[in-house]
């Protein structure tokens, strides 16, 4: 089972390849085909972290060398707390000491943290060199590796420093998910359900047909392929239509408005990003029902899917509703003082609106309190 999904852009179109076992053929994929050679230069810097590299580093390096690339490695510390300008200098130092040129390529081997940092380093080193994304977490496969958003965090906020820089190739080997911690897998399923709600009713139906969504071991190989293919197609379509988020791309923020507030108010310790998005999706669904944009039965179907993935669907205990409402005002998604929400209108479609009365948000959040 292999799928190739094109991301069509005015400049720098590229493919997302989903192919089990492809990690051992990364070098060949990077060479392109005789009809369409990739024109990537000979030098490659593989950027990863020790947790991922110990599982997959040797295979990636062997495959690159076999294809004739000259390979150097740069390992960054693992974790969101290291997604900083300071850590980025390690990539620049490695690029300098290995004499990377304009034609050279960074390969990001890891989750979204490695992908975002490597992408940003590629956007800025020598004013822009090639990057190939080899995502190893489910979240990076279905979201972070696609679409060219790159960056690092500022002490005052996540992803405040960044650039758009599209990869030359995204290569997904689903087999690497076998070593991904269960909680990371589950969190990414929230984003997969998100694509079903906002874009792809067929994906939503396939998820509904699955007995369990809570861990990789409970998914068939066919369902995993469906999840990866449909999610990547959804993201590729949206990015192709709106690369720089002038409009449509904002729908990918479904569940993120209240999700971000919950994440930051609990200090990024209690719920992880995907879990916060799950809570945010429940809230957005209830807001859509209250505004008569969405039918209650659809909100219930979404809730059932989230529960089937063992994702949280209520607010964490002791979170202050007023603090959430205040936090919404500080979010990146506020424009001219109005909080922007992505709200579903049917299974497979959503709108962006800033016409949500605060009283409705409060009422919905009250209904989601724990205890
Ligand atoms: P992550 O990169 O921190 O990975 C989660 C954990 O799983 C890490 O400890 C990592 O080392 C480990 N891991 C990854 N793959 C593994 C594997 N196959 N086996 C064993 N361990 C593995 O987190 P994430 O959830 O992948 O990504 C989150 C980041 O992505 C955030 O920084 C977020 O801002 C960013 N993001 C970016 C975009 C975008 O469009 N650029 C979109 C969504 C999220
Ligand atoms: N993760 C949202 C986006 O890429 O636009």
Image (cartoon, rainbow, N blue to C red):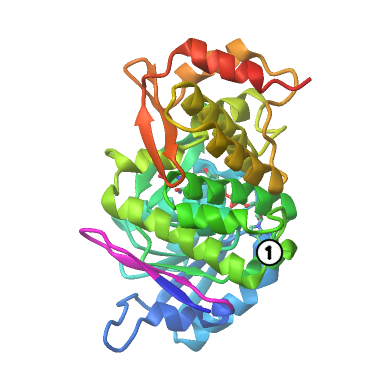
* Rendered location of residue 184, percent (x, y): 67, 51
Residue toward you, 261 or 148: 261
- Split into 4 quadrants, where in the image is the C terminus? top right
Q: Residue at x 48, y 70 (%)?
A: 171
- Residue 102 figure quarter: bottom left
Which region is colored magenta? 5-20
Q: In screen coordinates, is 149 left or right of 212?
A: left
* 298 drawn magenta: no
**Residue 140 in view (yes/no):** no
* Rendered location of residue 168, percent (x, y): 36, 66
Q: Residue at x 46, y 17 (%)?
A: 329
Q: Residue at x 30, y 82 (%)?
A: 37
**Residue occupied by mark 1:** 219
Q: How many marks?
A: 1
As drawn, 261 above or below 67: above
As drawn, 216 above or below 242: below
* 15 drawn magenta: yes
Residue toward you, 135 or 225: 225
Label 1: how many Cα within 10 Å (few below 14, some 14–19, many 20+):
some
Q: Is mark 1 within 8 Å of ligand 1?
A: no
- Residue 138 figure quarter: bottom right
Q: Residue furthest left?
A: 10
**Residue 207 in view (yes/no):** yes
Q: Residue furthest right?
A: 371
Residue toward you, 227 or 326: 227
Q: Residue at x 69, y 70 (%)?
A: 55
As drawn, 253 above or below 187: above
Mark 1 residue element: loop
* Rendered location of residue 294, percent (x, y): 46, 32
- Residue 6 figure quarter: bottom left
As drawn, 283 above or below 356: below
* Rendered location of residue 11, percent (x, y): 22, 60
């Amino acid at each position: 089972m292999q799928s190739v999904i094109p991301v069509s852009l005015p400049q720098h179109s590229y493919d997302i390849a989903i192919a089990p076992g492809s990690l051992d053929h990364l070098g060949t994929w990077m060479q392109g085909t005789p009809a369409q050679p990739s024109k990537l230069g000979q030098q490659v810097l593989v950027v990863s972290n020790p947790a991922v590299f110990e599982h997959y580093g040797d295979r990636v390096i062997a495959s690159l060398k076999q294809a004739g690339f000259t390979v150097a490695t740069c390992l960054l510390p693992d974790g969101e707390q290291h997604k900083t300008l300071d850590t980025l200098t390690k990539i620049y130092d490695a690029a300098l000491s290995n004499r990377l040129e304009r034609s050279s390529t960074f390969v990001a081997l890891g989750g979204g943290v490695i992908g975002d940092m490597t992408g940003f380093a590629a956007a800025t080193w020598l004013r822009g060199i090639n990057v190939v994304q080899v995502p190893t977490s489910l979240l990076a496969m279905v979201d972070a590796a696609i679409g060219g958003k790159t960056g690092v965090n500022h002490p005052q906020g996540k992803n405040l420093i960044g650039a758009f820089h599209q990869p030359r190739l995204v290569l997904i080997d689903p087999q690497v998910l076998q070593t991904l911690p269960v909680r990371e897998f589950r969190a990414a399923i929230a984003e997969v359900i998100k694509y079903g709600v906002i874009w792809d009713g067929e994906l939503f139906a396939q998820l509904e047909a699955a007995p369990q969504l809570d861990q990789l071991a409970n998914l068939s190989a066919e369902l995993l392929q469906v999840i990866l293919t449909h999610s990547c197609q959804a993201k590729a379509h949206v990015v192709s239509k709106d690369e720089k988020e002038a409009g449509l791309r904002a729908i990918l923020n479904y569940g993120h408005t209240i999700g971000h507030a919950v994440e930051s108010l609990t200090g990024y310790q209690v719920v992880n990003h995907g879990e916060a998005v799950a809570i945010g999706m429940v809230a957005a669904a209830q807001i859509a029902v209250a505004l008569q944009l969405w039918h209650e039965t659809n909100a219930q179907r979404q809730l059932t899917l989230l529960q089937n993935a063992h994702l949280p669907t209520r607010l964490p205990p002791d979170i202050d509703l007023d603090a959430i409402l205040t936090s919404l005002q500080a979010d990146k998604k506020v424009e001219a003082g109005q909080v922007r929400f992505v709200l579903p209108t049917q299974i497979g479609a959503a709108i962006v609106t800033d016409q949500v009365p605060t009283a409705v948000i409060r009422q919905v959040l009250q209904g989601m309190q724990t205890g």
